[in-house]
Amino acid sequence: MADSQDLTRREFIMSSGAVLVLTQVPWTLASPASAGAPATGACGSDWMAGPGKARYRIDGLAKVTGQKVFAYDFRARDLDGWPPTEHHALILRAVRVDRVYEDLDLSVLPPALRPLRTITAEELKRDRLTVPKAFPEVLLAEKGTAPAYLGQPLALLIFGDGRTMRRARHLLRRNPDAVRYGAPKAPAPARPYQPTTHLIRIAGEPEDGFSQRRDGPHDPTRAGRSDPRGTVDERARYYQEQIARDVAARGFRVFERTYATQVVDPMFLEPESGLAFYDRARGRLHLVVGTQSPHGDLESLHQLFYDEAKSAIRPRVIALHACWLGGGFGGRLTSVFPVLLGLAAAYADGPVRLAYDRFEQFQAGLKRHAAVLEERLAIDEAGRFQALEATITLNGGGKINHSPAVSRLAGISAASAYSLPRSAIHALAVYTPAPPAGSMRGFGATQAIFAVECLVDEAARELGRDPIALRRGNLLRDGDRTVTGAVARPPARSLEICERASGDPLWTGRDAARARFADGPSAYGVGFALALKAFGTDGDGVLAAVAVDADGTVEVRTPVVDMGNGSATSLALMPASYVGANATRIHLGAMAFDVLALETERPAPRKPESSGAFFPGNLHWTPTIIQASGASRTAFHHTHAVAQASRVVFESGLLPAACALWGLRPDALSAGEVRWRNGSLRAPDRPPLPLATVARRAHADGGVVKAMVHGYYSERWAEADFIIDHRRHRWPIDALAIARAGSDYALLDRRQASFPLPESEHSGRTLYAAAGSLVAVEVDRTSGEVKVLEVVLLVDAGPLIQPETVLGQAEGGVAMAIGWALHEELPPLAGGAGDGTWNMHRYAVALAGEVPLERIRIELLPAQQDEPTKGIAEAVMTPVAPAIANAVADATGCRIRSLPITPAKVKEALRSR
């Protein structure tokens, strides 16, 4: 492997790849860029500050020095074997949904600016291409129908070069006659995307009551019998009415409010961009693209070109080269962009670039759901929360995307950190002809927690109670159940956050500070909000491979894609705890895990046990193989996979080699009797052994020097026994392949594999990170302008893999939350992003002067013994917006219940007071 500084840009992206065979089609996924040498994953050692520590992020120098790391950076001339010239693609999109789309009229373009080829829905039908399952709606709107949503693709235009495309785009944007619309047609009515979510919990009922879960109704009170109360919706209403009668009979005080949050754009740095080439002679389709879900994209591309009917376009190999992302925030999760890029390549004669500018990204990109949240909170005389009823309605836009899952997490998050003996949560996402909404940072929890945190604050003020004290008396404690009936694991440290916040000078000094503003032009207020934010999904599958070379260098392979969140650095640090060194090569977006022979399709016979586990009869079965990057999964989930692969190499390869060097039997010492310090392995009364020495002996002895693992988590990790060199090991993984020096990977049979019961997924989320925020604001009494003066963020992050990364996530979360709370807004329909006229001249994000950069104080709770690492990327932003809303109410005495809190809304509230 050449040194990273010697690599050409062609080597930079093309020299690394792995092959996965899925159904009939072999395809390749190259790793995204790593600093210095993105294609190979070589990242050197300058970034390291010793084992398990980093001086700076792996990707830091490459990005700040302008190396080619993002998909937008690459050109066809950079790529080995590609023709050097590029075509450029442009997508024409619908700007009307109230009339039938009849046809295109490109005569508005002068002949020199017309496309070489125009692809419409008719071409896709003619060539028998299949709409991928991830996109159940049509890819391109069909003539004679009304577009399903604003911004829906109508046609894909291929131009000979970039200059021509840009000039044509300029004219087309200013000429609406290029798309002919016909007879008026009313948009389709709003309808729920299925499934909707009902979470009803009544403490004391068997299994805590009824709930509508991911895979259908779940009603333990019926024990599998038919229910005379009818449909799922009818049963949910039955239980809700039971709760309402109980609340009324007991005379609890009820606080009822409605809140609303707006549509926002993820606003990541790099608009979606890609480069693709269909080499017809060799039958190879290559895509260079930035995506959060490369594995899902490959599956979608396979479905596009291969179905039961014979497609006219059938590439033999689909190679997806996933680059670093210039931000993701969920906006690149199951995006249709890679599929459209693949289509462009299939119809272009040579390499083709599809790259959105910011206008196109606003028009086409996934959005955060707007939400209407109707809340009713019942509180008894002692200040204890007794019941919460919530109906959460999300605007899903015109494509389903992840809307049902987002609404489900919104429902799970509706009670945030609070213990409730009764809850009735209904959450749904509805179709509207707005641009599609997706899985933007927070995934529905941000909207749900905004509402409940504002409601709790309002209740506290009406009751004359301290807002933090009221929260503190109602927190989930050890053993308490969430609204799904699940027990949060590990217990979040919400109580400690509340105690720290109540003693913080910003909170204790708020009355004195408010008095100083009393006679001035501005009002001062301080607000607090708490968030209990789930990370991971209902059942997470993770993969990783770790290899130790004879010279002691370490390599990591992972399916994770770094979205700018520092995943590459965190995962490169993980081997140090087991093998004594950080990874100097890390391959992200890797696909070469087929040797594990994992299967998910076959039903798994179960043998339930009192421990809540079952043993599948199929030794290759696992519930979930891998998901897209997101859901704050790196810190807990993916680090586990890398750590366990490192553990296998150490316990089965390096430790026996070290024992041999010390003149002991291979099994003379256990892992607990040795430790790594300063890159050397140490044992009592034995000389220290540098990693290179141990690795050299392991290679010479034919020991285990590579391990590939799969893990599955749902309430706990699956685990199994594996036998290596006649020794039996039980590890928290469910699949393992090992390789010895000079040999290929070999799959090991697992024994006594114990999985969480599938019913564990009914519990929804069980992994949580807690965060709380204090915010001080100044509100101009005349203009209504709100200025954030100071932010305190209290975060339960568990043990820190890389503290600077956590702090960076937290600071970014504060800035994003300020934008969401005060500035960002897109009309969902008329006049919104779907008309293609939005850019930064209209969309207001928080600028540097609007974020108190010098007055953001982040306090990370010290890790407790045996506390796991936690995914906090979404938790750190979630409490800030409701804290701002609560601070504005504290300053003005006026409650603004819809975001953003604009000067116009503040002035109106002050006038109406």
Image: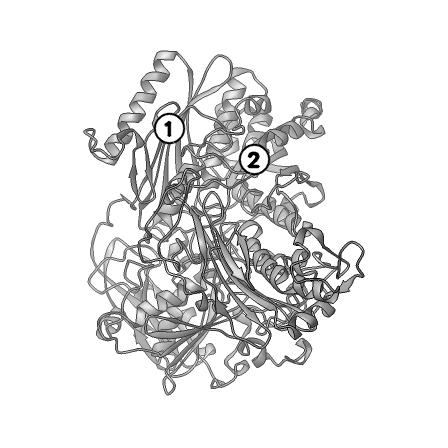
In terms of depth relative to the viewer, which is nearer, 705 or 361? 705
In the rendered image, the vertical position of residue 711 relative to residue 739, given as above or below: above
**Nearest to N terminus: mark 2 or mark 1:** 1
Q: Residue 256 is drawn in which quadrant?
A: top left
Q: CA distance from mark 2 to mark 1?
A: 21 Å
In the rendered image, the vertical position of residue 158 relative to residue 760, given as above or below: below
Helix, strand or loop under label 2: loop
Residue 595, x across and y down, in percent: 45, 68
Q: Residue 364 is drawn in which quadrant?
A: bottom left
Tell me the number on the disc at residue 208. Answer: 1
In terms of depth relative to the viewer, which is nearer, 146 or 810? 810
Q: Residue at x 68, y 78 (%)?
A: 3
Give the residue at mark 2: 492
Is 466 on the left-hand or right-hand side of 760?
right
Q: Residues within 10 Å of mark 2 (few under 14, many from 20)?
A: many
User: Residue type at mark 2?
Assistant: Ala
What quarter of the picture does the N terminus occupy? bottom right
Asked whether the viewer can see residue 902, the reply is no
Residue 679, x across and y down, in percent: 75, 61
Is 693 on the left-hand or right-hand side of 742?
right
Residue 661, x across and y down, in percent: 74, 67
Helix, strand or loop under label 1: helix
Is 91 on the left-hand or right-hand side of 66?
left
Residue 392, x across and y down, in percent: 38, 36
Asked whether the viewer can see residue 753, the reply is yes
